[in-house]
Amino acid sequence: MARKNQTLNSDFTVLQIFDHSPTHTFLFTLVLAIFTMECVGNMAMILLIYLDAQLHMPIYFLISQLSLMDLMIICTIVPKMAVNFLSGRKSITLADCGAQIFFYVSLLGSECLLLTIMSYDHYAAICQPLRYTHLIRPKICGLMFTFSWILRSIDELTDGVVTFSFSYCGSRKIAHFFCDFSAFLIHSCNATSTFEKNSFVCCIVMIGFPVEVILASYTWIILAVISMGD
């Protein structure tokens, strides 16, 4: 119990990809500039689609959500990395580490499912144009997006609860510039092999299904385009 309490009350140390040399300072500035442009570009895309009534269609709604997810992913990692670099600190609390893992992994998974929905939208628009408005209604589009978000959030929340139920000891240095499962579980005092195998199988299923749907959708699209030229 004392070891577990010590884990909950202690910070971890993350490695930095930049030091304070002139070259790395320039690279850090370049990363911040790219980060700023990414934020501005994604926010502009979201506002444009939201404010323009002509763009209130399922495909543009999905694009706006994709921009939102991209914005949230980079904001999960880069700001903390920048604060650590500018302050000279490398520590990260257990709560911050858990938040990074949850948002980063769940957002990546949700984005993968969102790309699957977008591929189906493209398939319906090209291969089933007469039924498009029936297959891709705004309500159905919103439900599919909400389902993908909830599914990945529940999955990662479960993994996060199990991960942080382990005790951690030994070196508290995370061999990464942000927290992720693989770098975090190395420091566990418990046997994690079963959990890691189950997580690996879940990842294969959660990635394999979207990839199959995306490949099938664009295969049908390519065949439909080829048949139009005959």
Image (cartoon, rainbow, N blue to C red):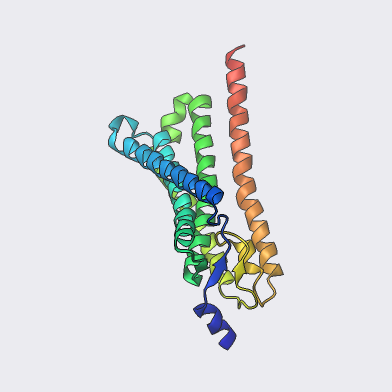
Q: What residue is shown at x 53% (from left), y 47% (from top)?
A: 27
Q: In the depicted view, which residue is nearer to us: 106 or 72?
A: 72
Residue 144 in view of the camera = no
Q: Residue at x 35, y 38 (%)?
A: 44
Residue 79 relative to residue 210: left or right: left
Relative to 90, residue 34 above or below:
above
Rendered residue at 48%/28% (across/down): 125
In this view, the residue in front, 207 or 30, is 30
Furthest-bottom residue in this view: 2
Q: Is 156 in front, or is 30?
A: 30
Q: Is residue 178 above or below residue 63?
A: below
Q: How many marks?
A: 0
Measured along the vertical axis of the image, is residue 133 above or below residue 43? above
Q: Residue furthest top?
A: 230
Coordinates of residue 222 in the picture (x, y in percent): 61, 24
> Residue placed at 65% from the left, 72% from the top?
187
What percent of the width, then of the height, locates residue 71? 43, 47
Q: Is residue 104 left or right of residue 204?
A: left
In which quadrant of the rendered view does residue 12 lie? bottom right
Judge left or right: residue 36 versus residue 217: left
Q: Is residue 120 above or below residue 226?
A: below
Q: Quadrant of the C terminus?
A: top right
Which residue is more in the foreground, 107 or 127?
Answer: 107
Q: Position of residue 146 (x, y in %)?
A: 43, 50
Which of the 4 image quadrants contains residue 138?
A: top left
Quarter of the image where the N terminus is located: bottom right
Task: Using the rendered image of the protein, determine whether residue 180 is visible from the camera's viewpoint.
Answer: yes
**Which residue is situated farthest in the front direction here?**
22
The image position of residue 169, as x and y in percent, is 63, 78
